[in-house]
């Protein structure tokens, strides 16, 4: 079993976690980042990093961050996306693209997010999910 630490105020993050939890609830534990900042700090990851990059703790207690966490999450959930994330060229390109996407995901208009990822269960009307983690 793995634990995924995610920004629960991010509509993209919430939609992805909802989808994966429906697919394999027995393999993944979803934990909102803000409820476990102390634990993540012990791994040397600060609040800005935890709100920006997805973090996953594997069954051995090792923490993975960023695209490595995304890859592990999809491999654990056995999604078709996992295959693509492990392909050599795509693996390398995703390593370059993910940090840029993660830092700027809050700028993506809600309509596009809903179209690509579906509407999240979380309420983003208060605007929190569209605020840069550095400004929260």
Image (cartoon, rainbow, N blue to C red):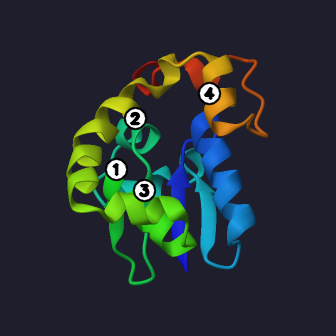
- Structural crowding at the residue carrying mark 1, measured as other residues with C-alpha within 10 Å and reported as few (<14), some (14–19) or many (≥20): some
Mark 2 = which residue? 102
User: In whole angstroms, how far apart are the C-alphas of marks 1 and 4?
Assistant: 19 Å
Q: Residues within 10 Å of mark 3 (few under 14, many from 20)?
A: many
The spot of residue 133 in percent (x, y) is: 45, 27
Q: Position of residue 10 (x, y in %)?
A: 59, 34
Name which residue lies at 55% across and 42% down: 7
- State yes or no: discs 1 and 3 in contact (Cβ < 8 Å): yes
Q: What residue is shown with label 3? A: 70
Q: Are marks 1 and 2 in contact (CB under 8 Å)?
A: yes
Q: Earlier in the sequence, mark 2 or mark 4?
A: 2
On the image, numbered disc 1 is attached to which residue? 66
Mark 2–mark 4 Cα distance, whole angstroms, equals 13 Å
Residue 22 falls in image quadrant: bottom right
Q: Residues within 10 Å of mark 4 (few under 14, many from 20)?
A: some
Give the SS element for disc 3.
Answer: helix
In the rendered image, is residue 9 in sight? Answer: no
């Amino acid at each position: 079993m793995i634990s995924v630490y995610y920004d629960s105020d991010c509509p993209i993050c919430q939609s992805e976690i909802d989808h994966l939890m429906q697919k394999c609830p027995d393999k993944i534990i979803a934990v909102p980042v803000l409820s476990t900042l102390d634990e993540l700090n012990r791994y040397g990851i600060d609040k800005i990093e935890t709100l920006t990059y997805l973090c996953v703790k594997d069954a051995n207690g090792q923490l993975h961050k960023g695209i490595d966490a995304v890859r592990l999450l999809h491999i654990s959930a056995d999604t078709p996306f996992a295959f693509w994330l492990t392909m050599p060229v795509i693996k390398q390109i995703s390593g370059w693209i993910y940090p840029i996407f993660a830092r700027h995901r809050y700028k993506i208009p809600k309509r596009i997010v809903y179209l690509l990822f579906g509407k999240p269960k979380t309420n983003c009307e208060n605007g929190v999910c569209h605020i840069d983690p550095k400004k929260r």
